[in-house]
Amino acid sequence: MTDKPISLRRQILSQILALLVLATVLFPVLWVFSMALDPRDLSRPSTLFPPGASLKSFKSAIDSPTPNPVSFWQLARNSLLLALGVSLFAILVGTTAAYAFSRFRFKGREAGMLFFVIVLMVPATATLAALFVMLNGLIGPDLRNSIVGVGIAQVAGTLPFSIWNMKGFIDTIPKDLEEAARIDGANANETFRLIMLPLSLPGLAVTALYGFMAGWTEFVLSWQFISNPKWFTLSMALYGMQGQYASNTPWSKFAAMSIIVSIPILLVFFVLQRYLVSGLTAGGVKG
């Protein structure tokens, strides 16, 4: 007789806890929206519903994102090129390298994986000087002072995680599937393309999302390497809005720009969401 009241009580407590977590997560997001809509340009709004709320800050962020002669759409194009380039190389190079580390045995395999772990522990700022000198030495300042040079540097920092992540995922795929494909006459390339890649879609989605986020939000390398305004990115424009003091920062415009910059990442996440939560290898081999 007491089972139903207890389960109902637990359900109510669970719902309350879930609502508290939801409120905790959404409150900072709502606060940023409040700052963007507040025409008073305050760093600490006193209410989530500012008086005289308007979208002028969004229009200002798009019309004049930086004091330099570069448009918002040029900034968005550069950010998109950087994000897509990093994501594409992370998938292509990371997946093929991870497949080699997972399925083949060769000299230096363990040392290579250990090297990737060590690289992952090194902060990105520690490599700035070395990357600056290397990019200048390859072709000259023109490569370093461009979105291509920043992309090369960003890929160098993204690949270790991509390889490590994809190797861990490929390790979970049964080798029986590849052996069955070879018995049917498939070569190594066909096995990789027709068996491994379709089954690796969840891992590829994570790698693609990580690469896109790393390229889209990157500003440390860009801020140090790029001085030509035509190669500026949205993240650089957002970082450049910060004044030396809080009173010098256009907070409404800054918040509006933050929301605009976050939208593409949300779109990519929702596109890849069905792969992020699916297990395509489940039931691949009959027990």
Image: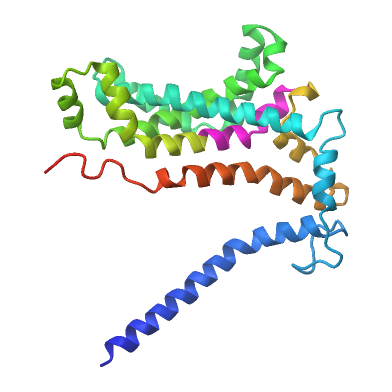
Residue 190 painted magenta = no
The residue segment tinted magenta is 211-227
- The outermost residue toward the left is 287
Q: Where does the image place residue 60, in percent across and percent down from the top left?
A: 85, 45
| Residue placed most toward the observer, 51 or 272 | 272
Q: Is residue 240 above or below residue 185?
A: below
Quadrant for the C terminus in the image:
top left
- The outermost residue toward the front is 184
The residue positioned 78% from the left and 23% from the top of the image is: 230
Q: Where does the image place residue 179, in percent across and percent down from the top left?
A: 16, 25
| Residue placed most toward the observer, 123 or 237 | 237
Q: Where does the image place residue 79, in percent across and percent down from the top left?
A: 66, 31
Q: Magenta segment, principal secondary structure?
A: helix
Q: Quadrant of residue 229?
A: top right
Quadrant for the N terminus in the image:
bottom left
Q: Where does the image place residue 282, in percent across and percent down from the top left?
A: 25, 45
Q: Is residue 235 above or below residue 21?
A: above
Q: How many marks?
A: 0
Q: Quadrant of residue 223?
A: top right
The residue positioned 82% from the left and 60% from the top of the image is: 38
The residue positioned 52% from the left and 47% from the top of the image is: 270
Q: In the rendered image, is residue 101 in sight?
A: no
> Does residue 186 appear to the left or right of 23 in the view shown?
left
The residue positioned 15% from the left and 27% from the top of the image is: 180
